[in-house]
Image (cartoon, rainbow, N blue to C red):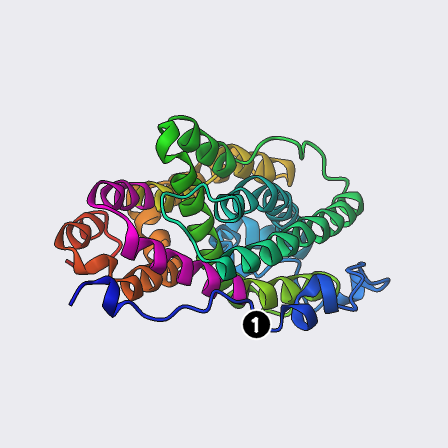
Amino acid sequence: MSLLSQAPAFEFSLGDWNTRASVRASAHDYRLPDDVAQQLETRHWFPPAFLPYLAHPAIEAAGRSVVHRLTANHLVHFLDYTTLLEHRIVNRAVETIVHGELPVAVPTSMKTAALQLYTDEGYHALFSSQVAEQIANLYAITGRRVMPRRITRMNLLIARTGQEQKPLACFLLGFVSETIIARELLDVCRDSLVSGVNDMLRDHLTDEARHSRYFTEVFHYLWLHLDPRQRMFTATTLLEILEIFFEVDEHWLQESLCGAGIANTTVREILGTMTTAQARRQRARAGSLATLNALKKAGFFAEPQNQTLFAKAGLIDG
């Protein structure tokens, strides 16, 4: 019996997209509340637990207003990055599906769901930008148009990939992004956040949970049909992409901390702690669980060389 005859059935559907997608169903306007100051007595712009540098004694001693400023900086940076990611990375990945650019012919149902997902991502870019603008105006945050390091690294990866493999590399960037962000948003939404921000992130999560399942199914389908050379390219590229996703944007973080009045010695201590190889591996291992589970489900780790490759990188046990 051939491998393909044993392949699972795929639906490639976003389910009741017409009635559940945020762009179709959400009643939220994503405006910041009038009582922002009061809400910040008990809520956050972004969960402090996701920003370990906030626990540095010098930052804790600086007081609540500095913590609010740093979490606002982070949220604006995250939303500006998200706007770029949705347009330039995720929807480019979706285009490879819709327009038949991948090395494998795909079913019509896969293309239809991709078109729906493309619409969702455009809306995510819109509300991310809208909320970022409001917070940036509130805190007079400037210098926002600097390209995030992660986007720069992803663009470089695509630029140096051979023409024949570019569409597959674009798809893999989207696959990793969508499986990671769904888990991230789930964790973020467990915190008590300022309303408006909370509404936006929860609507985003609702969509991304479906998108993660969709990209997981598409990857599974592709993996079953890729030839050995394409599988090798996929494995090594996935490893590089995961490394990109868990790097620290040192330049941006330094500017954020210095702009909030944090002393240079403290900034150097924070960056030194966060940029070690061990710290990066720990972030990658914890943050890529959903992606690794998707790979396992597709049979990716049934190939010993892939198991060895990811174990050497510290992402899985050997």
Judged by its main secondary structure, the magenta piece is: helix
Q: Residue at x 20, y 63 (%)?
A: 3
Quarter of the image where the N terminus is located = bottom left
Nearer to the camera, 250 or 168: 168
Question: Does 176 sit left or right of 255 as displayed?
Answer: left
Amino acid type of the residue that numbered disc 1 sits on in the rendered structure:
Gly
Per the image, label 1 sits on a secondary structure element best described as loop
Nearer to the camera, 267 or 294: 294
Nearer to the camera, 258 or 36: 36
The residue that disc 1 covers is: 15
Q: Is residue 162 magenta?
A: no
- Residue 71 vertical placement versus 96 (above, below): below
Instruction: Please state the horizontal and vertical placement of residue 22, each as a whole percent of the image.
Output: 69, 65
Quarter of the image where the C terminus is located = bottom left
Q: Residue at x 43, y 53 (%)?
A: 106
Q: How many marks can you see?
A: 1
Q: Is residue 216 magenta?
A: yes
From this viewpoint, is residue 317 visible?
Answer: no
Instruction: Please state the horizontal and vertical placement of residue 56, each as a whole percent of the image.
Output: 48, 51
- Residue 251 vertical placement versus 55 (above, below): above
- Residue 164 vertical placement versus 211 (above, below): above
Q: Residue at x 82, y 63 (%)?
A: 33
Find the magenta span and give its range: 209-238
